[in-house]
Amino acid sequence: MKIENLILEHPYKYKELCEVLGIKPTSKANNSRIAQFKELERYCDFYKEGHKIFITCIKDTVGVKMDKRKLVKETDKRKLGNNNTQAKYIRYLLCNLLSNYNLEQDEVIGFSKGLLLRKLNLINENYINAKCLNEKYAISLGVSSMAVDECIDYIDNRSINAVKKAIQVLITQKAIGYKYSYTWVDKKGIHHHATVFEHNAIMEAEFEVMEKMNIRNKGVIFEFGRWEEFKRKVKTYLLEEYKNLFPRFDFYYSSFHFHYNMEQLQKHMRYMEERQGISYQEAKNGVSSLISTSLDKTIHNNHKKAIEIDTLDNIIDEKINYRKSKTYIPEQTLIKNSIVHQDYKKIPVNEQLKFNIDNVEIPF
């Protein structure tokens, strides 16, 4: 089972979970499915809610498996080694980043998704234009907007999953505390990390607006081109229903909130430096190189899988046809490099964004 691919609290459907774990789905009436869930219990804690399965915790140790395990191929060992090295680099860079903020009692430090990925050297400053001005960005690179969207999809997925896994390990190692929440900004530009009550108010506003927009999944709002409409309506709702709670409210964004004891955090950093031989410069350069190499493999795998699709299935899909094309690998490599490589030149676009990546929520 590919436990390392799991995302905590993600609402997996059974077939989706099997795909992530690299196992074959079985019939509900088949005892094999029961055996699969018993095997999964050795690796993690989970619960079911309707047809969805939620992973709550990945266990530090795994019980002894009764049947013989297959030997891991050397190529798999090398791949695992690269993944482990990248994960260590991200953990070290995150600890290093947080060590710059000496928190007082009950304080937290928050980062938007885009800012955190950039601080951890997983993306560069071109990301925000590629994400939010994709058509103009595509023109500047001489590719289609679909090609840019394709690249952003797997960069988002791989980078944010890598960060979440790094955070989870640091939590189990008791180096940090964490929650995913909101930050709201007043008209003076002061950022306020949401309290529990404020968090619930924003969740309520988003839920009610999504109901009226007839959208059940927040993640597709951006894809439908209705992100600005959504954010505007949520702001109106908050100003009407919770005006006293959010005085002089300007905007809000989703953010990663961290809290920690500085002494523990620095002690963990020293452990990584002294016992694991990690340095800041090594981690900074290494994580950028490893994420780029990992994404290169994703590009080639996407191309290979598209070619292997049986033409007798009569699949007419623009994305699949693009992945099959000879231009796919060179175009995706170009776009990926422009977003991930730290020394890549800034890509000019005709229109500049009116907001700052440090403050804006970039939808998942």
Image (cartoon, grey):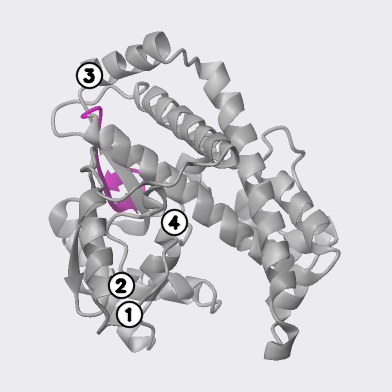
Circles 3, 1 touching at the beta carbon (< 8 Å): no
Identity of the amino acid at label 3? Gln
State the separation of the CA atoms marked 3 and 1.
42 Å
Nearest the eye: 100 or 70: 70
Identity of the amino acid at label 2? Glu
User: What residue is at 71 percent from the left and 72 percent from the top?
Assistant: 308
Q: Position of residue 94 (x, y in %)?
A: 40, 30
Q: Position of residue 251 (x, y in %)?
A: 38, 58
**Residue 206 disc label:** 2
Q: Nearer the viewer, mark 3 or mark 1?
A: 3
Q: Mark 1 points at which residue?
A: 209
- Whether 308 is drawn above or below 137: the answer is below
User: What residue is at 35 percent from the left and 81 percent from the top?
Assistant: 216
Regarding mark 4 in the picture, which secondary structure is present there? loop
Left or right of residue 312, residue 53 in this image: left
Q: Does 66 lie within the magenta span?
A: no
Circles 4, 1 touching at the beta carbon (< 8 Å): no
Q: Earlier in the sequence, mark 2 or mark 3?
A: 2
Q: Where is residue 150 in the image (x, y as percent from the top left)?
A: 65, 65
Residue 258 visible in image: yes
Q: Position of residue 301 (x, y in %)?
A: 67, 58
